[in-house]
Image (spheres, helix red, strand yellow):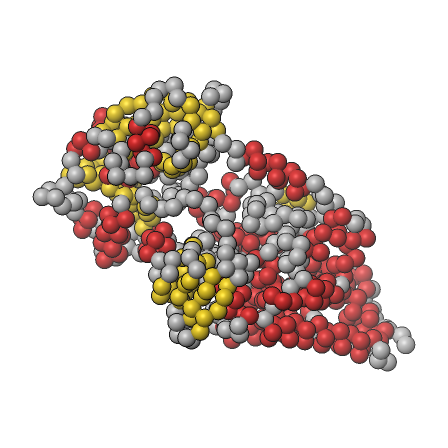
Amino acid sequence: MHLSYDVPLWMIYPIMIFGFYTAFTPLHDASHKALSSNPFMNDLLGTIAAFLLTPGNNAAGYRYIHMTHHRYVGNKDLDPDELLVHLPTHYFPFGYLVLLVPDILLGYWLFFKIWKRTPTKMKLNILGILLISAAFNIYWLTSPYWYEFLILFFIPNRLGLAYIAYFFSTIQHEDGEIWENHPFQATFKIKGNFFFLKSLLGQANHHFHHFMPHIPWFKYKAVLELANGVFKKQAIPEKSAFEVLDKHFLEKVIEKSAKENRTIKVEITAINDTAKDIKHFSFKALDGEKLPKFTAGSHIMITLPSGKTRAYSLVNPPYDRHQYQIAVKLEPNGKGGSKEMHELSVGDGLTISRPKNNFVLYEQVQKYTLIAGGIGITPLLSMAHRLAELEKHFELHICAKAIENIPFQYELKHWSFAPNVEIHLNKNGKNAINLSRVLATPDKESLVYVCGPSGFNNWVKDSALGLGWQPEQIKQELFSLNLNEFAPTKAFELVLNKKGKTITVEKDLTIIDALLLNNIKVDYTCLQGTCGTCIANVVEGEVDHRDSVLSETEKMAGKKMCLCVSRAKLDKLVIDV
């Protein structure tokens, strides 16, 4: 049999290969429900794209496979893409041949890695994809048109799949680097020629996709500007589009992480009484070096001589790196941390953590209203210094029972932002701030920052919402926020209130895993706690929140949870499902 054509294959193949890559992009977005806001259209368009790649493929089946990758990046037992990274890294150049047969690797993953964790319906779906694809290729390769099929479909299709696997998996992740351990180092930013990178349809910035998987590829660039350009500050590693993979990258990441997370030895250089029962502490590094950079709103964890650890907000300007400053209020009925701090002396040594920030000052807007309740002034002072440096318009409102309860009174009168400060003292036992005046003009270019006791914060937030402010414009920090690391996972009983059913969530499974294994359908998009699709109401029980969607107020209220990452603190949890 003979083929007759006027255009040489070396010209046709690149177009066909990129065509397969282009078809994969809508399937990829459909797997995160980012292709269409209509669920039916999203999956229909995704399935059409999937079928163009491999006959029998569909959006639902690929969604399960791809979501599993997102949850278990780098896990040699559970990540379906792990072999696409491991084999090319360790068996250069022959390991790259596996990119031609990703379906065979998928079958191996399903049967030998994740079979017991996969719901029956999804097993059948993925098996159907593999069998239909195999049958399709075998039929045509054994037909009278085998040569045409081989030259015009099978070879470019396999090369297209290899191209997809390479740019979506092989060069995007490092061998053995698990997402949960080092999220900012588990993915790469790809370097290369401008026009070549544009042709990758967003995958040069594939690392954005793992942080915000529900965002479509053409919006990746906008993610760069989020949270003061937070991604630019995370030292996300870069690599060229075509280079030999580094077998020792994981060792380098671990070594770097150990350096970045080490504790710091400091000495107390000054202690001053700055208000009634409030002491102002200054620290410097014992080695005399500059302390690590921090951003407005950051806190440090201090290990006290007794071994207790406490979190305190930094109050000094972020540009001042020769010292850290905090203010500590004595709490007679507390757990002893503040009392121990008040017993320290100048010259004492302490161990502190590197600064962390759970109360980010977003610097993109033009106007800020900072409202402090009592000692809640501490993180807002650092923000005021930063806003003054940026020459942003802001107001700092300080609420207190009496003037002697306000720290830094002298400084508040002499700092450069003194004209921006307004003090509100209680009258007749009630807070004197007039929120109807302070928050009278909601503005899209404004943010409200509030820090104080939970009741104070809730009052300010509810008042702001009543005056027309949007929830996302109100940022708050609560004193009682638990800053400890997540507790080890354990099994628990999950009661489904609407269905009247109880299931067990094993320690190595998520709630969504358990629901799917029990044939209970639940909507999800990211499986990383970043999109909010799977939020459910909590009827009873304490939640171990592990998401980044719910506000701290919502987490402390305990009425909602993200089913994809959060768990039960105790042995039983009741949800409204």
Residue situated furthest left in the rendering: 428
Above/below status of 210 relative to 497: above
Residue 410: percent from left, percent from top: 22, 26
**Left or right: 210 with respect to 380?**
right
Residue 507 shows in this picture: yes
Which quadrant would the N terminus be assigned to in this image?
bottom right
Residue situated furthest bottom in the rendering: 144
Residue 128: percent from left, percent from top: 68, 76
Q: Residue at x 81, y 61 (%)?
A: 10
* Front residue of 348 and 561: 348
Above/below status of 264 relative to 575: above
Residue 450: percent from left, percent from top: 29, 45
**Left or right: 305 with respect to 139?**
left
Above/below status of 285 relative to 392: above
Residue 181: percent from left, percent from top: 57, 46
For residue 52, what is the image quadrant? bottom right
Counting the numbered discs, the total is 0
* Front residue of 89 and 37: 89
* Front residue of 93 and 350: 350
Q: Residue at x 50, y 60 (%)?
A: 491
For residue 420, what is the image quadrant? top left
Q: Residue at x 45, y 66 (%)?
A: 494
Residue 323 shows in this picture: no
